[in-house]
Structure formats: C-alpha cells, structure tokens
Image (cartoon, rainbow, N blue to C red):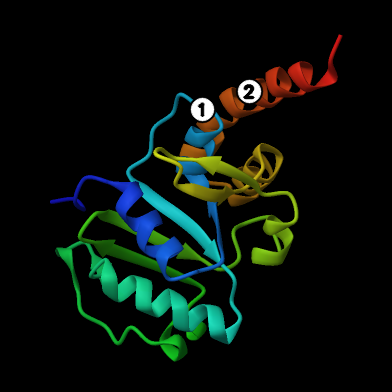
Amino acid sequence: MDRLPLQPRPIFAALNRCSVEYVVVGGLAAVLHGSPIGTQDLDICPNPEARNLQRLAKALREVKARVYAPDAPRGVAFAIDPEALQRATISNLVTAYGGLDLVFTPAGTRGYADLARDAQPMDVGDGLMVETASLADIIRSKEASGREKDRVGLVALRRLLEIVSERGAGP
C-alpha cells in the first residue's frame, strides 16, 4: 500500500500560515515549471535555522505528519520538534494530505540558501504563493542524484529550460 494521494495545496497553506521558509524542489517543482512528468509527493528544502525549524514543526503538526514506512503507509508517529528536524538530512513523511519529503541538502546543491537565491515565487492557485527552485537548479539536482527516475525526466526538463530561455531572450 502506498502513501495517500498528494494534495499539496493544504500542505503549502499550513507551511505559509506558520511562516516557514522553504523552497519547493523535486518533481512538483518541475511540474510547477511545466514539466509533463507527474509526481507522487511534495519535496521541500526548508531553511535549517532554529527559528524556522520551530515554525516547520508547528506546520508539520497541523498536517498530522508522521514518518513514512513501507509497512506502515499511514506513517509512524515521531516527536515533531526542532531538535528532531535538525538531526535529519532527509525526512520521508506522510501527512493527512499525502507524502511530504523534507530534503535539507538536495543532491547537487548546498541546501536552502543556495536554492533560495534563484527561487521563483509561483501561484499554486487562489493566490497561494510558494517559492520554487529554478528550473536550472532542479536540473542540476536531478543530474547529481544519479537516480534512474531522474535521468528519464532530464530530457524533458532540459527541453523545457531551452523553451523558457528562448522566450526570455526576446525578439
């Protein structure tokens, strides 16, 4: 049995309500840029500063986050506190709204500050804005990951970057 179907907007709403600083990365970030390749979960790269981890812990409690385990697809309870979050490099979670992965240092990056520099605000509906990794940063991370599923999508992402770059070049 897999995780619950992804409903990212309520997760984004909780993160924003709690003033969490984060950048959307991974497959959903690619989808927000126009990639045709779907995803099953939401990956974010949170700012690792202590105050932000406090806000993140509050948001995770709001969305009823639990640690994902293959034999417990509804998740396993854990202490949702800044200290536990600080010790993790990657946390695969399940929430009331689907999968949420916290990736503090995505492959090929130096983490939040690196990604936030070129992140772009994107509207995910009804004015709900999220900071999303740039398409170039998504490609850089997927190239560095070495995962087969990322290699497959890179052709489409590189082509999408070409199209976006051509549009931005002007007449």
Q: In front: 19, or 151?
A: 19
Q: Classify 168 as above or below 54.
A: above
Question: Residue 58: x and y, percent?
Answer: 36, 78
From the viewer's perspective, tell me whether residue 153 is left or right of residue 166: left
Amino acid type at image mark 1: Ser
Label 2's element?
helix
Residue matched to label 1: 35
Q: Amino acid at mark 2?
A: Leu
Query: Which sits earlier in the primary sequence, circle 2 or circle 1?
Result: 1
In the rendered structure, find residue 160 and report the number of the disc placed on it: 2
Q: Nearer the viewer, residue 103 or 47?
A: 47
Q: Is residue 101 visible?
A: yes
Q: Where is residue 124 drawn, in percent x and y?
A: 44, 40
What residue occupies the far front of the structure in this picture?
127
Q: Would residue 111 be seen by someone viewing this image from the given angle?
A: no
Give left or right: position of 10 versus 2: right
Residue at x-position 53% and y-position 26%: 34
